[in-house]
Image (spheres, helix red, strand yellow):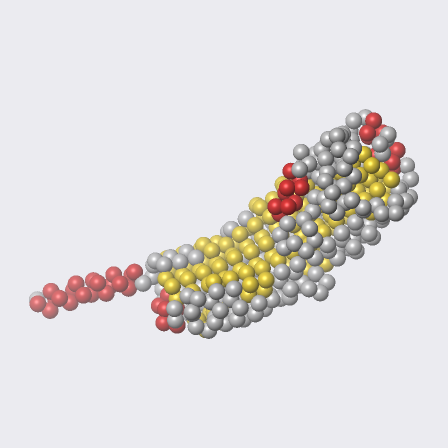
Amino acid sequence: MTFLRYILPALAVADFTLAQSCSGAFTIENSEDASQVAGCRTYSGNVVLSTDAPSELSFDGELQEIDGNFEAVNAKSVNSLSFGSLQSINEEFTMQNLTRLYNLNMPQLGYIGSVQWQTLPGLQELDFGNGVNTVNGELSIQDTQISSLSKINLRSAVSINIANNRGLQNINWQLESVNKTLTLNANGIQGGLAARFPNLTEVGAIDVSNVSTLDISGLQRCRQFLSVYGSNIERLELDELTRTGGFSVKNNRNLNEISFEKLRTCDGGFGLSSNDKLGGKVDLPELRTVRGAFNVTGAFEGLSTPQLRTVQGATVIKSSEDIGNTCDTYGKGGELKSSGVLQGITTCSGKSNDPNAGTGGGSGTSGGSSSSGAAWNIGPAPGSAFGLFGLLAAILGMF
């Protein structure tokens, strides 16, 4: 009886301690700490790597779920992380300033709450087995050497920001919707990134530069703005798009074909400029409303907007080519100006020596009181990693 009197409380304390080892905030200082977490089937709490964590850490074992965050920031000695059985990180997966990390082994991982990866200059490959198919929140991957994202294939996300990954050459996802912004900037140092999202139908905003291919052919609605600039694309098909916020396709030197079969409404400014190989007639067969400025400049040979009813901002139509009687429709004394469709200042000319002059940094207008209506820039500055705020300010400035 005396034995039981002492041993039973001791066993109870031991059992309580073991239970507590699989929950709560845990800072990983060494391999033993990693092994302790790996012994849990589910770890409930945040797992954080110490900045002094060793070079190799293995969480191989029973661990299938982290019901919390996994965070590794400024752990500059870490070069290898292995999670042999981990299937989900339910909250945020953060890796920042891991300058020596080259191996990330997570062959069972399928679900992540959100991803924040930045400054991982040694990381080139992702060993994700069958691949991550769900990121419930934001996905941000910046400043890595990752060459492929084939092991990530999302159908939806809150926002996506993939920027400054110089080795990344291709993304081909079955993505269907992005609630906020899809950003692709400065990826693929040679020739740019080939980005294919053929199933994407709705997005908050699109901010894309330095791509060699862009397939968003299924896009139906873009709520805030659509900006494609400084890229090597030859073709842009937007035939399912019916409504967008601001619109800017600019400085794409190889673009020679663009189509908008169903676009009816542009809730901000519309800009198609400085695409030097885009010739022929620019055809917007269903466009009815532009609530900002309307800019079409470059080397085109004509413009057709047979359904146009309202342009609330300035209108600039300028080409280096002979555009025939286009200015009879869009010029200062043209049909659409006289009928009140074009409500702001209008400028129209063909055979212009510099048709794109003033489209890089001027200010637009939504009324007829300013003489600066010939210059308007919807897009972020080329080379910026993320132009959302500057672009949104430009759009709002139209009203």
The percent coordinates of residue 378 (x first, y second) are 70, 44
Left or right, 339 with reference to 10? right
The percent coordinates of residue 127 (x first, y second) are 54, 68
154 lies above or below 148: above
Q: Does residue 273 appear in the picture of this structure? A: yes
234 lies above or below 304: below
Between 361 and 209, the residue placed more toward the observer is 361
Residue at 41% from the left image edge and 66% from the top image edge: 50
Left or right, 337 with reference to 80? right
Q: Residue most toward the left?
A: 1
Between 345 and 136, the residue placed more toward the observer is 345
**Image quarter hosting the N terminus:** bottom left
140 lies above or below 105: above
Between 328 and 281, the residue placed more toward the observer is 328
Residue at 62% from the left image edge and 62% from the top image edge: 165
The percent coordinates of residue 240 (x first, y second) are 70, 43
Residue at 62% from the left image edge and 52% from the top image edge: 386
**Image quarter hosting the C terminus:** top right
Q: Residue most toward the top?
A: 339
Tag count: 0
Q: Does residue 265 appear in the picture of this structure? A: no
The percent coordinates of residue 217 (x first, y second) are 70, 49
Residue at 64% from the left image edge and 38% from the top image edge: 396
Between 278 and 387, the residue placed more toward the observer is 387
